[in-house]
Image (cartoon, rainbow, N blue to C red):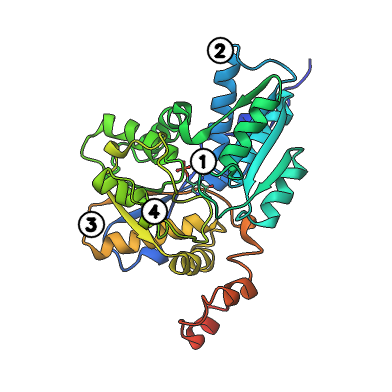
Amino acid sequence: MKKEIKAYNNVLELVGNTPLIKLSKLTEEIPGNFYAKVEAFNPGHSSKDRIALHIIEEAERQGILKPGDTIVETTSGNTGFSLAMVSIIKGYDCILAVSSKSSPDKIDMLKSMGAKVYVCPAHVSADDERSYYNVAKRLHEETKGSVYINQYFNDLNIEAHYKTTGPEIWDQTNGQITHIIACTGTGGTLSGTAKFLKEQNPNIKVLGVDAYGSVLKKYHETREFDKEEIYPYRIEGIGKNLIPTAIDFDVIDKYTKVTDEDSAHMTRQIAKTEGLFVGYTSGAVMQAIKQFAEEGEFDENSIVVAIFPDHGSRYMSKVFNDQWMRDQGFFDSVNLEEVQKIEY
Ligand code: PMP
């Protein structure tokens, strides 16, 4: 009789069910208990595996996607990588319009996964015909048998996290979670996760993280689109120059904004102190925890879950590159002795 082979049928079976890891050193001085939901453990190394798989499988269920069809999307990199991965396994072509702000390693990775990549200028407005939104729309219109994922305006983005990330965190904390905190780009991660968690316990506090240079925090507070808030910044994947419908602003209690520089240093500190090699926006979330703590948001009983969206390997030419840090002026204001002590 044949013995069982303990193997997965393909990488897609490993999407989701990411671990919750207790943070210790970084949060030592802050009252409360802090855990990171480390999405780098997904096979595509980011939380975007969840939405790529969910949106594509939902399109298949609805008969919108047929074998040999094409997936089209705009992406800062992570969603593209996940879509390319799912496309390979399921036999679709994948076309991606990405921002020129994306790191070269991210773009090379997309190409390695068989995607066709169009690099579009980052510092044009969303309605400019060269913006990656409009380029993707045009590619979709011009490619027969294509599906436009449209993560910023697709309810299935929220639903993916409502069905997976939220229940996982509720289960992992045995329903004891008091705060959920995450960066918002499309807003799908925080909105979907928080929607599920608030249905279980409406007292859970939902904390959003935005970037300086993005309109989201201000929109949350005023429900007005303030163009003055928009200017270039460096973190990829967080903040926006438009209002995505994948953000449910009503489910978010409070926002904070983080700087490129603070987030970059924090990302490096997470690796040095917690042994967690995670991406730039994980540093942004950690920085936000520090800022919320300064506002008195947490106490000894707080059980805080922070979503760390992706893996550090995607930032080798940026945050984890000393020359890049120097070029941004991120080493100018730090005490060099301190820097040497933690071996930057
Ligand atoms: N961090 C990174 C690195 C991302 O790529 C994204 C997605 N744009 C986010 C955070 C934010 O996730 P969401 O789009 O679900 O708000």
Q: Is residue 307 above or below residue 200?
A: below
Give the class, few, some or many, for how many residues have Cα within 10 Å of label 3's Cα (few <14, many ≥20).
some
Q: Which mark is residue 297?
A: 3
Report helix, strand or loop for mark 3.
Answer: loop
Q: Indicate the secondary structure of the residue bearing disc 4.
A: strand
Q: Earlier in the sequence, mark 4 or mark 3?
A: 4
In 3D space, how far apart are the residues under numbered discs 3 and 2 (Cα atoms)? 43 Å
Residue linked to disc 1: 18
Side (left or right) of 302 relative to 264? left
Residue 94 image point, x, y percent: 70, 32
What is the spatial separation of the Cα atoms under label 1 and label 3, in whole angstroms? Answer: 26 Å
Q: Of the residues shown, which amino acid type is indicated by label 3?
A: Glu
Q: Are marks 3 and 2 in contact (CB under 8 Å)?
A: no
Which x, y percent locates residue 3?
Answer: 75, 21
Q: Earlier in the sequence, mark 3 or mark 2?
A: 2
User: Which of the marked residues, 2 or 1, is nearer the chain's N terminus?
Assistant: 1
Q: For disc 3, does the CB lie below 8 Å from ligand 1?
A: no
| 182 relative to 189, above or below | below
- Using the image, tell me which numbered label, if any, was put on residue 62: 2
User: Where residue 118 sits: x, y (%)?
Assistant: 70, 43
What label sits on residue 210 in the rendered view? 4
